[in-house]
Image (cartoon, coloured by chain):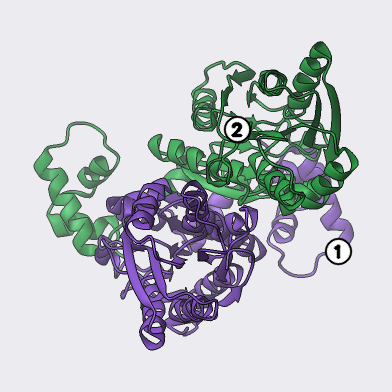
Chain colours: A purple, B green
Amino acid sequence: MATLKDVAAECGLAVSTVSRILNNRGYISDEARQKVNDAMRRLNYYPNELARSLHRNNSGMIGLIVPHIMHPFFSKLISCIEESCCRRGYRLLLFNTQSVEDKEAEFMQICSRNRAAGIIMCTGGLSVKQFKDFGIPVITIERSIEYGTASVECDNETGGHLAGELLWKKGCRKVLHFGSIDSYRMPADQRYLGFAEVCAARGMECIRIPSNAEAFQKMEYREEIESALLRYPDADGIFANSDVIGAQILQVCRKLEISVPDRMKVISFDDTLPAINTTPRLTTVTQPISEMAELAVRLLEDVTQGRIVPVKNVLPVSLTEREST
Amino acid sequence: MATLKDVAAECGLAVSTVSRILNNRGYISDEARQKVNDAMRRLNYYPNELARSLHRNNSGMIGLIVPHIMHPFFSKLISCIEESCCRRGYRLLLFNTQSVEDKEAEFMQICSRNRAAGIIMCTGGLSVKQFKDFGIPVITIERSIEYGTASVECDNETGGHLAGELLWKKGCRKVLHFGSIDSYRMPADQRYLGFAEVCAARGMECIRIPSNAEAFQKMEYREEIESALLRYPDADGIFANSDVIGAQILQVCRKLEISVPDRMKVISFDDTLPAINTTPRLTTVTQPISEMAELAVRLLEDVTQGRIVPVKNVLPVSLTEREST
C-alpha cells in the first residue's frame, strides 16, 4: 500500500505540505489540493483513519444498539440515524440484541473498546447498570434507562389519548388494546395508560390484551389476536401498539369476516411501511421517527462537545387517519 | 480512564502477564483470568481496540453498503448480515447510498481508511471501478460488479420460471411484469427474462411495465400499477419483482374492484414481511436471504485468510404459495 511519502514524491510537494492538505490545516491552494488528490488516486493511497482515531482517542463512530432490525419501526429508525450520522461525519456501528439482555453489555464493551464517540440505545435491559461510569455518552430512544446521558421518546401518552378519542368519536363502546410487553417497563407503556384514561373518562369499556417479547421478536401476533376477537365478539374498536400488529389485526378480521372499518375500527401506532401498504390502509398514530433520530445524534454531538443537554426529550405525535377507522 | 498498568497494580500481576491474558497468549490459569477480569471491571478498564487494529492494519469491521435500509428486503438482509458478523467476531459498519452513485465511492473510501476487513456491496454503480485495486475484498450481493472479489445472488432466472409456470397452471393467459429498474443492469433483471421465457413457451401474452430508481427509493408504485391495470383491463396475472410492489398491487386491485385471486393472480418476489402481513397473503418466490448473508460474510472471511473462493455464487430459490394465486 502506498504511503504519505509516496504521495508527496508523486506530486512533487513536501510531506509536511501533503499532511497539511489531508488535515485541512492552514492555507491550501486549489491547485495543490487537486495535485494531491490526483496523486492519491493514482497511487491508491488512503490515509489511515485508525492512527488518527487512536491519537484523538475517539473513532468518530456511533454505536447503535437495537432489539430488532427487521421490525419496520426499527428499520426506519436505523435508516434515519444512519442519515443523521452520515451528515454529521459519524460512522454507524450497528448491533442487534434480538432482545437478549446479555448482549447489551457485550455490545457496549465493544463500543467502548473501539472508542466510539457515543452510543444510541434502543434496548433497555438491566445489564447496562454496570456501565454507568464507563465514560461514553449514552442516548436512549424509547427506553427508560435512568443512568443514560439523555433520553428521546415520543409523546406516547398523548398518542394513547388521540387513539381513544378517535375510537370514541367513531362510535366505539367496547375496545381492545394490543401489544404492551409485560416483561419490562418502557415509555411505550404510556400508550395504554393514555388510552385507558380516555376510555374511563368516556365510559368506553377497555380490555388490555398483553403481549410478550417473543411475539415482538417473531412479529407474530395472529393467534393472540384471533383468540381475543373470539373471546370478545362484541368489541367494536382496537388500538394496537404498532403497525405490524395493526396489519395482522386486519388479516384476522378478514378471516373472521369482521368488516373493517364498518364493524371494527382499527388504529395502530408508528406510521411505518405496513400502515401504508395494507388493505385497507391503517389509521395510525404517527411517531416523528426522523426527528427522534436526528435529535439523538445531535444530543450525542452536543454532549461530546461538552454542552449540557436536556435529560428527557419528548417529541410530539400526531394522528394520521386512513381507511381503517 | 484506567490504563493497563492500573489493572496490573490492582490485581498484583505483572503488566506483561495482564497483556498476555488480554491477548489470550500462552498458558493462563482460570484464577489469574478471573483476577484480571474483576480488576478491569472495578477500574472500568477497556482495552483499546484501536491500538490493536492499527497494529494488525485491520479493524475487524465489515462495511455494508446498501441502497436502502427500510426496504423489507434490505432490512432483512442487514439483520442477517449483522447476525453473521456478530457470530464471527466482526463489527458491522452500515452505509446507505439511497441510490446516489457518488456515495459508493465515498463509503468505500471510509472503509478503506478505517482498514475494514472487507466490504459487502449491495449497490452497483459505476463509480466503483476506480477502487479495483484498493486492496480490500469486496463481496457483492445481487449486484453485478465485474471487479468485485466474488458475487452472491439468488437464482433469479429460475424464480422467473417458477412464477411463469404457476400463473400458467392457474389459468392466466395475459400477464404483466412489474418492477425491473431500467437505469442499470443487475441480477434481478433475470427475473423478467426467466418469466418471459416461460410466457413465450406457453403462449401467454406478457407485458413488461418497467420501473425506476425513484419508485424503488420511495417504495411507491401505486400510480404506475393503477395506470397499467386500466391500460390492460383483460390482464389476469401479475408477477412483481418485490413483495412491496405485490402489496401495493393488492391495494390497487381492491380499489379497482378486481378480486384477488379470483379475477387476478398475483405473485411477488423476496418473501419478506409484507408478503406475510397483507390481506390476502402473497404468493411469492422465496429468496434464501439468511443463507445469502451468511455466505457473503464467510466468503469475506475466506478471502481474508488467503483462500480462493468461487467468484460467482448462486443460491436456489423456491416458490411459497399463499392466498394471492
For the N terminus of chain B, the image quarter is bottom left
Residue closest to the far bottom = A201
| Quadrant of res B314 | top right
Along the line of sight, the residue nearer the viewer: B126 or B167: B167
Q: Position of residue B247 (x, y in %)?
A: 65, 45
Say which residue label 2 marks.
B283
Q: Position of residue A292 (x, y in %)?
A: 55, 71
Looking at the image, residue A16 lies above or below residue B279: below
Say which residue label 1 marks.
A29
For the C terminus of chain B, the image quarter is top right
Along the line of sight, the residue nearer the viewer: A146 or A33: A146
Host chain of mark 1: A
Q: Is residue A218 left or right of residue B117?
A: left
| Quadrant of res A43 | top right
**Residue shown at the point (18%, 50%) measured from the top left:** B36
Q: Amino acid at mark 2?
A: Thr
Q: Is residue B57 left or right of residue B145?
A: left
Q: Amino acid at mark 1?
A: Ser
* Numbered circle sitting on residue A293: none
**Residue shown at the point (88%, 37%) measured from the top left:** B232
Host chain of mark 2: B
Residues at marks 1 and 2, CA–CA distance in whole angstroms: 61 Å
Q: Dot 2, how many residues are within 10 Å of its Cα: few (below 14), some (14-19), or many (20+)?
A: many
**Residue shown at the point (39%, 54%) measured from the top left:** A225
Along the line of sight, the residue nearer the viewer: B169 or A291: B169
Q: Is residue A311 left or right of residue B273?
A: left
